[in-house]
Image (cartoon, grey):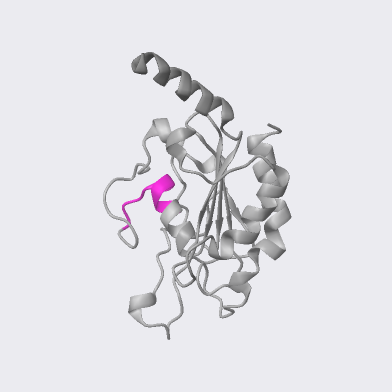
Amino acid sequence: MASLAAPSGNVQARQSCPKVHVLGAREPTVPQGYGSSQAMIQLIQGAYPDITSEAIESVRTRPVIVVGYYQGAQIMDDAFCGGTDGSSLSGTAAPLLPADVGKHFKAIIFMGDPRNAPGPSYNVGMAKAGGEGLANIPVLVQFAARPSGYQCPVYADRIKSYCDAEDLYCSNGNNAQHHQQYIQIYGQQALAFVKQKVGSI
């Protein structure tokens, strides 16, 4: 009887799953939680009131939205886009995510990504240089720009990456405060992209 009851429970769990899920990746310098991506997560939650941030294992049939800020964006960039340039990730040029998992990610938002480089079709903002840091920043905290013109091989049509020239983390600017303003400047634009990719659910 237990083996017969298990599928019914699984079906019920799937039916009760929220229709959209969101994952946020924060910078490492803030307490546990969403960090600087919190305000963007809240915009998305406002558009999809039934949204959840629970583990993806139980929701494999539902669309997932990702928001990465600063090094949270760098980690997501590496996971979705791979790359062999060695500045952040070495190994395969293919994405790190298996295709059967990656297909559920419908909208991917990077803000202040140190992997930023000029050229990709998904770049948004005024940055003309990658996240190479400033000459007076110690080598240990230099950044990880991709080669100019690099395109994410699988997920490019699902990504928007926001970086402005003033930012010293994703570009070669000198304004650390500007790095914290992407949601204020681009939040509604990013939300419109999310809605376009996910649709009304």
Image height check: is 154 above or below 14? Answer: below
Q: Quadrant of residue 125?
A: bottom right
Q: Which of the pair 177/60 is nearer the observer?
A: 60
Query: At which x and y percent is residue 133?
Result: 45, 75
- Residue at image location 53% in from the left, 24% down from the top: 12
Furthest residue toward front: 1
Region in magenta: 77-85
| Residue 152 relative to residue 177: left or right | left
Q: Which of the pair 64/128 is nearer the observer?
A: 64
Residue 167: in magenta span: no
Query: At which x and y percent is residue 184?
Result: 70, 64
- Residue at image location 44% in from the left, 71% down from the top: 132
- Residue at image location 68% in from the left, 38% down from the top: 196
Furthest residue toward left: 91
- Residue at image location 33% in from the left, 77% down from the top: 140
Q: Quadrant of the C terminus?
A: top right
Image height check: is 60 above or below 47? Answer: above
| Residue 35 relative to residue 39: left or right | left
Q: Quadrant of the N terminus?
A: top left
Query: At which x and y percent is residue 53?
Result: 54, 46
Furthest residue toward bottom: 136
For the image, the number of numbered tags is 0
Q: Which of the pair 44/148 is nearer the observer?
A: 44
Image height check: is 81 above or below 114? Answer: above
Q: Which of the pair 191/44 is nearer the observer?
A: 44
